[in-house]
Image: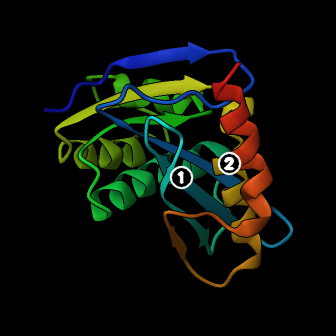
Amino acid sequence: MTTPVQQNRSTRLHWRPPPSELFKINFDGAVFTHEKKSGIGVVIRDHQGSIIASCSKPVHQELGSEDVEATAAAWALFFALEVGVKRAVLEGDSLSVIKGLMEKERLLTPMGLLIEEDKQLSQHFEELHYSHVKRDCNVLAHNLARHAAGIPDLLVWMEDIPSHFHDVLQADLLGLSE
């Protein structure tokens, strides 16, 4: 069963884990104006902060900021389903996307069709919650989205992230002990 419930509105400066029975799917989008393309970053973690899977995906067109965020949310849901995640918190730093996902009615905005695609994917989860956080709590997904600028196609890491982001992960894990 899918339930659109806002999990939290964190103002903390670090990533926070999901409840022990859920995974957390962080997503972010980035726009590279000079390259005329966009990027998507996704990281899935368990309640201890351990990486389940992560990815960077270039989008070979320049999308608007809301559109790339909505596209990133759809890709995050698809990616989570592909790696077997069925109970999760979808978390991002785009308030308009998270609010759109929580709306029962169709959105009459340019990104409305993208949000509808996200809602269709959400129906494949047994349990799904939504969470909006500030970018400081979404740094790893943000870095993965920025990483997409320099790659030709989708890159996936199972139980890992690119080695040059290990310091970001460690900073998140230090935040768990605070």
Note whether 60 is above or below 51 in the view shown. below
Q: Position of residue 9 (x, y in %)?
A: 56, 14
Q: Residues within 10 Å of mark 2 (few under 14, many from 20)?
A: many
Q: CA distance from mark 2 to mark 1?
A: 7 Å
Furthest residue toward front: 177
Between 147 and 112, the one lying in front of the other is 147
* Residue name at image x 26 percent, y 49 percent: 121
Read off the residue under disc 2. 140
Q: Are marks 2 and 1 in contact (CB under 8 Å)?
A: yes
Q: Residue at x 39, y 41 (%)?
A: 115
| Dot 1: element | strand
- Looking at the rendered image, the quarter that the N terminus falls into is top left
Residue 59 in the image: state x and y as whole percent. Answer: 59, 70
Query: Is residue 112 found left or right of 17 in the rendered image?
Result: left
Task: Answer with left or right where residue 175 lies relative to residue 80.
Answer: right
Residue 155 image position (x, y, % from top left): 56, 76
Element at label 2: helix
Q: Could you say which is closer to the camera, residue 172 or residue 39?
A: 172
The residue at the far right in this view is 34
- Residue sitting farthest toward the left: 1
Q: Which mark is residue 43?
A: 1
Q: Earlier in the sequence, mark 2 or mark 1?
A: 1
